[in-house]
Amino acid sequence: MGTIKNTISHPHNPACGRLLILSAPSGAGKSTIVQWLMKEHPELKLAFSISCTTRAPRGTEQNGVEYIFLSPEEFKEKIHNGEFLEFEEVYENRFYGTLKSQVENQVEAGQNVVFDVDVKGGCNIKKFYGERALSLFIQPPSVEELRRRLVGRQTDSAEAIENRLAKASYELTFAKNFDRVIVNDDLEKAKQETYEIVKTFLEG
């Protein structure tokens, strides 16, 4: 990835929002925790950074709501134009990424932008924003528990689940690069712990 020019307003401008990065292996409960925070705690003024992806929509997902859905060709054109804050090709022609322009607009509007991203993306965004961003790693109790959750979802084939578990084992090695690690062995406890950490950061 090339050098990204930081065009976002000065970090100490109180009118500007702050940045929250939540990453986790697939199935660790990250999205559940993020959705709970946004729904139950509107006072935190959280707003999603909506990622781009080349995967097909699932269920009731809508373009521009859960994700911005692009073709691999469209995605590659935006990479070429340097429009992404971070991106990754997870599998061949399966891309995920965060548009810089969207983040800049949201922060300048005073929103606290939430990045619900994979582990490598989380590391890249933290590296770019430094102390302006808080990075949280949601960790499953074990890989076996992760297997149980992924099987229970019934959204992936057995082969896909094995691929995800292999990737999860690798992603767990990145936990040490995050500001805080939250072990999701009890969802309610993990939600409250995340809330307290986020609240303290935003008030700081």
Image: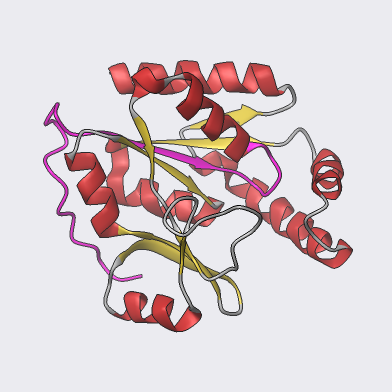
Pick the quarter of the image with the N terminus. Answer: bottom left
* Rendered location of residue 160, percent (x, y): 79, 64
User: As displayed, is residue 138 above or below residue 157?
Assistant: above
Residue 197 x, y percent position in the rendering: 46, 20
Query: Can you say whether 100 is above or below 132 in the image?
Result: below
Number of labels in the image equals 0
Q: Is the magenta stretch mostly helix, strand or loop?
A: loop
Give the answer, above or below, for where 77 lies relative to 122: below
- Residue 21 screen position, x and y as percent: 44, 40
> Looking at the image, which is closer to me, 145 or 131?
145
Residue occupying image coordinates x 56% and y 79%: 93
| 71 vs 23, nearest the viewer | 71
Q: Residue at the spot x=46%, y=60% of the render?
A: 63
- Would residue 116 be found to the left or right of residue 99 on screen? right
Q: Is residue 9 magenta?
A: yes
Magenta residues span 1-29
Q: Which residue is drawn at 46% across and 72% down?
A: 70
- Specify the quadrant that holds the C terminus: top left
Residue 41: say if magenta. no
Horizontal side of 125 relative to 59 (left or right) equals left
Is the image coloured rainbow, by chain, by secondary structure, or in one colour? secondary structure
Residue drawn at x 77%, y 64% is 163
Q: Where is residue 105 in the image (x, y as percent from the top left)?
A: 21, 48
